[in-house]
């Protein structure tokens, strides 16, 4: 009873202690890390396979079907769905919630090994699988559009500058850039023009290769230092490639633009992104594998504005 009497006869001290405990509780609650997408093992496994150049019908019949037959024998599969596109197949396996995901992963690997002999021989790699987890999904997707920049130039800016700046934010684990690829010059040769001018494919290739080299031009040195001089003669735009001389026909120069259509493009024209019906570059931001605070989104926006300036 004496212990409780201390609080009764000293109300001021009691109030101060209660206030201190309350403040410590509020401060501790505010400092608790919050994970909007926690690391949770869901009973879902995705199997991916690729065969470059194969049509969706070929992928479905020669790749997806053998895998489905082998994966369908796994115990505890609640639902199996597959989709095939140009050169790729993806199969999603949903297991019962009481199924151990690690044991299911071992069964999936065994099923893939069993179906390996039934798959086409031209596949560059074996089918792979991965566990589905909501924490692996992007916590934010930024889109970039421009009225003046090309998709290749915008992708180059996003991958070399913007993505690296965002990746330095505390709590950001990875930044993937999609929607296009790096700038490139696309050369479409005209077979009839090549025949008329007497130009071979090897001549075109050698002329393009020789126009994209870095040549050393000597060095500058003094008693202490030495500086190596190197020139970059690489061509970067279609306008620079078109006047490239690739052949001489009866003393007349045959230029690349005479036998081919030369255009500014990107390395992979099949990689495309859209937002509001406009071509766009996508930046997919993923968090670190640890709890993060919701204020990270504000930091991402601030860094994007700083990078734009």
Image (cartoon, helix red, strand yellow):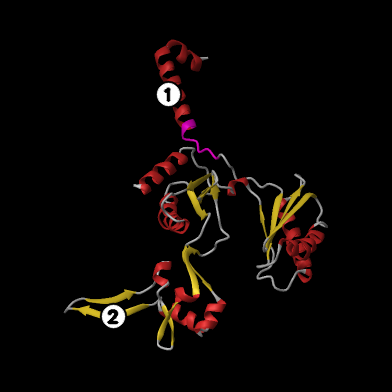
Query: Which residue corresponds to the image point at 49% horizontal and 17% vertical from the top-left?
Result: 3
Please tell me which residue lies in front, 114 or 66. 66
Please tell me which residue lies in front, 154 or 219. 154
Q: At which x and y percent is residue 178?
A: 53, 55
Q: At which x and y percent is residue 156?
A: 44, 58
Callout 2 crowding tier (Cα within 10 Å): few <14, some 14–19, many ≥20: few
Q: Most prominent secondary structure in the magenta stretch? A: loop
Mark number for residue 20? 1
Please tell me which residue lies in front, 273 or 174. 273
Q: At which x and y percent is residue 177?
A: 50, 54
Q: Earlier in the sequence, mark 2 or mark 1?
A: 1
Query: Which residue corresponds to the image point at 68% horizontal and 46% vertical from the top-left?
Result: 42
- Provide the residue span drawn in magenta: 29-35
Disc 2 element: strand
Q: Does 141 lie within the magenta span?
A: no
Q: At which x and y percent is residue 30?
A: 47, 32
Query: Would you name the residue on which mark 2 appears?
Result: 217
């Amino acid at each position: 009873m004496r212990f409780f009497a201390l609080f009764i006869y000293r109300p001021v001290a009691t109030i101060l202690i209660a206030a201190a405990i309350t403040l410590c509780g509020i401060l501790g609650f505010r400092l608790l890390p919050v994970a909007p997408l926690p690391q949770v093992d869901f009973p879902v496994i995705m199997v991916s396979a690729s065969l470059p150049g194969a049509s969706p019908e070929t992928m479905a019949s020669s790749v997806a079907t053998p895998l489905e037959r082998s994966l369908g024998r796994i115990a505890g599969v609640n639902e199996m769905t597959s989709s095939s596109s140009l050169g790729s197949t993806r199969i999603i396996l949903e297991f019962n919630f009481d199924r151990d995901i690690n044991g299911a992963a071992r069964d999936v690997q065994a099923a893939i090994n069993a179906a390996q002999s039934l798959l086409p021989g031209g596949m560059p790699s074996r089918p792979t699988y991965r566990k589905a987890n909501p924490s692996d999904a992007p916590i934010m997707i930024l889109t970039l559009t421009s009225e003046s920049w090309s998709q290749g130039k915008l992708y180059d800016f996003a991958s070399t500058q913007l993505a690296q700046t965002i990746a330095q934010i505390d709590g950001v684990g990875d930044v993937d850039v999609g929607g296009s690829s790096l700038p490139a010059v696309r050369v479409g040769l005209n077979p009839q023009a090549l025949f008329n001018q007497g130009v071979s494919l090897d001549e075109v290739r050698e002329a393009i290769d020789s126009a994209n080299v870095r040549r050393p031009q000597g060095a500058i040195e003094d008693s202490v230092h030495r500086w190596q001089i190197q020139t970059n003669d690489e061509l970067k735009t279609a306008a620079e490639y078109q006047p490239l001389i690739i052949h001489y026909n009866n003393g007349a120069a045959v230029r690349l633009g005479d036998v081919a259509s030369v255009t500014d493009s990107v390395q992979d024209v099949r990689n495309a992104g859209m937002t509001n019906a406009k071509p766009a570059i996508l930046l997919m931001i993923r968090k670190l594998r640890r709890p993060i605070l919701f204020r990270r989104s504000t930091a991402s926006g601030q860094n994007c504005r700083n990078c734009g300036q």
